[in-house]
Image (cartoon, rainbow, N blue to C red):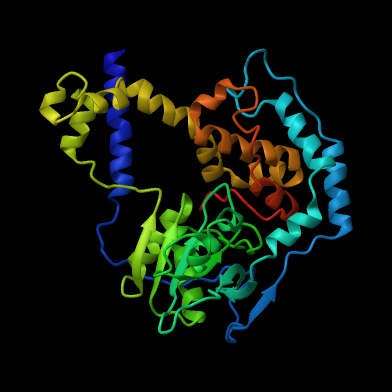
Amino acid sequence: MMLLELIMAAVLGTIIYLFLTKTKEKVLPIGDGWWAAGEKPDSEEDTVIRPFKVVTSEEEIQDLHQRLDKARFADPLEDSYFHYGFNATYLKKIVSYWRNEFNWKKQVEILNQFPQFKTKIEGIDVHFLHIKPLHLSEGQSAKPLLMIHGWPGSVYELYKIIPLLTDPANHGLNGDHVFEMICPSIPGFGFSEAPHKKGFNPMCAARVFYKLMLKLGFQKFYVQGGDYGSVICTNLAQIAPCHVKGIHINLVYVSTLGFKRLLSILLGQYFPGLFGFQAEDIQRLFPFKRKVLHRIFLETGYLHLQATKPDTVACGLNDSPVGLAAYVLEKFSTWTDSSFKKLEDGGLENKVPQPFRFCGLTGEERGDGSM
């Protein structure tokens, strides 16, 4: 078993090393793209920025209700809780609330509380929020900030922080730093149009958002990204370093896996002092198979599926709001705290996230393998 563990660690380490060090360029080529259906026209692209509001029709609500009413649930295994994914018994409670209590009219008002727009970039409609501060001191200027959401999410996950950054003084915070915020929906998410061609990746998203900032008149700006937005922000800083004044990300990829680091993974449990490991390091990393490899294999099945067969999973999730709810909420449960697998409600009882409702009605968010 030890030999197998060493081999698996070596293979995984090599894969991670190659992935994280596949380019050593400090500034990446910006390139160009066209993601609309068909060939790129010879005419100039439409540069108009159009106001946008979220609107739901009674027909859409009725269709959603009918799909919720016709949902079929499989009985979970006894005492399985959230160990095998979203527990169907608890899912029934979620669906009942969604169907009978959730106030769509109020939610639309919440979604429309900030100015929203759409504009064409590289052939597709890009949706974004643009919030300007209402209160600036004399001589004070706002700092332009591009904030990018992640998966499974949408711009809605940024709504609570927007007032704190655009109007900090009125929210008990230091008013010396005030931001003008631009929060786009990644193409294929929320109200942004999905690309119609293969090959749309984080670099392409970074370029689209870079063009968005230039279109809005920002030559210098800050960027912040969460989850997959972190990757996009990193790429944006790599293709336009002279335009990005600062970057903040909360999912950090560190490319430091050299031969010594690989040896530390293979032998660190047995010779911790040789690699500078402390007791806490040993506790977190070893046994490597159970603490790292097992967790990776256990929690990244969705990633492989979305990266290889996105159209297949999209057929089910786009057609079933209940399936989409289970798929998304399971991540909110497990990624918040893996111990929530042992709870009947997956730790979601007091806080039901909004993104699956947002996506369930728009039908726009996709698990695109190229993203």
Q: How many marks?
A: 0
Q: Nearer the viewer, residue 64 or 11?
A: 64
Q: Quadrant of residue 110?
A: bottom right
Q: Quadrant of residue 35?
A: bottom right
Q: Nearer the viewer, residue 353 or 154?
A: 353
Residue 265 rendering spot, x and y as whole percentages:
24, 29
For the N terminus, the quadrant is: top left
Residue 47 rendering spot, x and y as whole percentages:
59, 83
Q: Nearer the viewer, residue 260 or 358?
A: 358
User: Along the horizontal axis of the image, is 1 left or right of 371?
Assistant: left
Residue drawn at x 55%, y 59% as measured from the top left:
198
Residue furthest out toward the left: 274
Q: Is residue 248 above or below residue 51?
A: above
User: Along the horizontal axis of the image, is 185 left or right of 362?
Assistant: left
Residue 272 rendering spot, x and y as whole percentages:
16, 24
Residue drawn at x 57%, y 53% as measured from the top left:
157
User: Along the horizontal axis of the image, is 271 left or right of 104?
Assistant: left
Residue drawn at x 71%, y 38% as measured from the top left:
323
Q: Nearer the viewer, residue 365 or 180?
A: 180
Residue 107 rendering spot, x and y as whole percentages:
74, 55
